[in-house]
Amino acid sequence: MQSYRIETTVSEQGTLVIQDVPFPPGDHVEVVVREVENSPDGQAKYALRGTPYEYRQPFDSVAEAEWGAGQ
């Protein structure tokens, strides 16, 4: 079963419009509508999204001394 997710806003008339769905005409689909939940502290769900990051040594071993097999 293929899923398709979109976020939209209810219009002043209380209607929703969903355009350009990836299903062919005549397909039987189920539509579930739920309110988007905001985080309790008012921050975005993915607060670090868009934050720049840098890998300084991306090919070095991680915690090599912690592995018992290497000793």
Image (cartoon, rainbow, N blue to C red):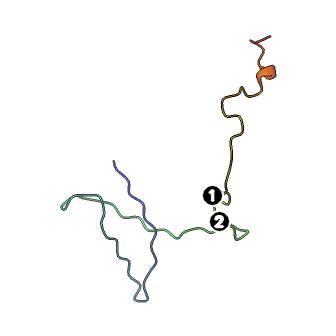
Q: Nearer the viewer, residue 55 or 36?
A: 55
Looking at this view, name the residue that lies furthest to the bottom: 12
Q: In this figure, which residue is indicated by the disc labeled 2?
A: 44
When the figure is inspected, residue 2 is found, relative to residue 65, above or below; the finding is: below
What is the x, y in percent for residue 52?
67, 54
Locate residue 58 relative to residue 67 in the image: left or right.
left
**Measuring 43% from the left and 89% from the top, which residue is drawn there?**
12
What is the x, y in percent for residue 37?
59, 67
Q: Secondary structure at mark 2?
A: loop
Q: Amino acid at mark 1?
A: Arg
Looking at this view, name the residue that lies furthest to the front: 56
Q: Which mark is residue 69?
A: none
Q: Secondary structure at mark 1?
A: loop
Locate residue 15 relative to residue 22 in the image: left or right.
right
Q: Nearer the viewer, residue 30 or 57?
A: 57
Badge 1 density bin: few <14, some 14–19, many ≥20, Cα 10 Å: few
Of marks 2 and 1, which one's residue comes earlier in the chain? 2
Nearer to us of marks 2 and 1 is 1
Labels 2 & 1 near each other (Cβ < 8 A): yes
What is the x, y in percent for residue 26?
18, 61
Distance CA(mark 2)–CA(mark 1):
9 Å
Locate residue 27 relative to residue 56 in the image: left or right.
left
Q: Amino acid at mark 2?
A: Ala
Q: In this figure, which residue is indicated by the disc labeled 1?
A: 49
When the figure is inspected, residue 48 is found, relative to residue 54, above or below; the finding is: below
Badge 2 density bin: few <14, some 14–19, many ≥20, Cα 10 Å: few
Q: Quadrant of residue 49?
A: bottom right
Locate residue 23 relative to residue 16 in the image: left or right.
left
Q: Nearer the viewer, residue 4 or 68?
A: 68
**Measuring 40% from the left and 89% from the top, which residue is drawn there?**
13
**Measuring 44% from the left and 68% from the top, which residue is drawn there?**
33
